[in-house]
Amino acid sequence: MAILNKPIEFEWDEGNSGKNWARHKVSDQECEEVFFDNNKKIFKDILHSGKEERYILFGNTKKQRLLFIVFTVRNIRVRVISARDMNKKENKLYHG
């Protein structure tokens, strides 16, 4: 996949570490797991891409939790902006 280089590196700092746990009970580790889902779906987030390109990822964790993740790539590192459980519509797109 052209968006993500292998191996994937993640950027976690004060700005995004633990943020998704506080809002949606999604751990940083769960966010990372979704990027290794062989069935993940990635789309450009055209509506929210301003100064940098953003992407939407639909994927599954090791415990089969379906997550919706918004991320960007900065200097070859993935930076998760937001993560939450998929809604019904997103679930259909993932299983599509």
Image (cartoon, helix red, strand yellow):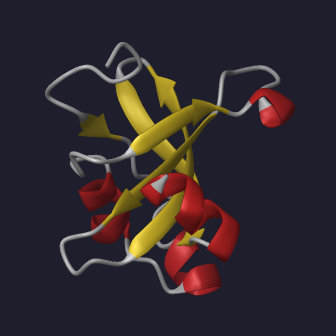
- Image spot of residue 56 (x, y percent): 59, 43
User: In the rendered image, is residue 69 in sight?
Assistant: yes
Residue extending farthest left: 7
Nearest the viewer among 7 and 64 is: 64
Q: Residue at x 78, y 20 (%)?
A: 51
- Write down the quadrant of residue 63 in the picture: bottom left
Taking 73 as reference, is 62 left or right?
left
Q: Position of residue 57 (x, y in %)?
A: 50, 46
Residue 52: name its quadrant: top right
* Residue drawn at the location 41% of the way across and 19% of the way down: 3
Above or below residue 50? Residue 58 is below
Residue 14 is situated, as x and y percent measured from the top left of the image, at 51, 59
Q: Number of marks in the image?
A: 0
Q: Left or right: 90 with respect to 51?
A: left
In the current view of this chain or complex, which residue is farthest to the front? 96
Residue, x 47% and y 67% (percent of image)?
67
Residue 21 locus on image (x, y percent): 50, 81
- Residue at 49% x, 52% y: name it: 96
Q: Can residue 15 be seen?
A: no
Which quarter of the rendered picture does the N terminus lie within?
A: top left
- 10 above or below 77? below
Question: Is 40 in front, or is 89?
Answer: 89
Q: On the picture, is 5 further left or further right than 53?
A: left
Query: Relative to residue 85, is residue 93 depicted above or below?
Result: above
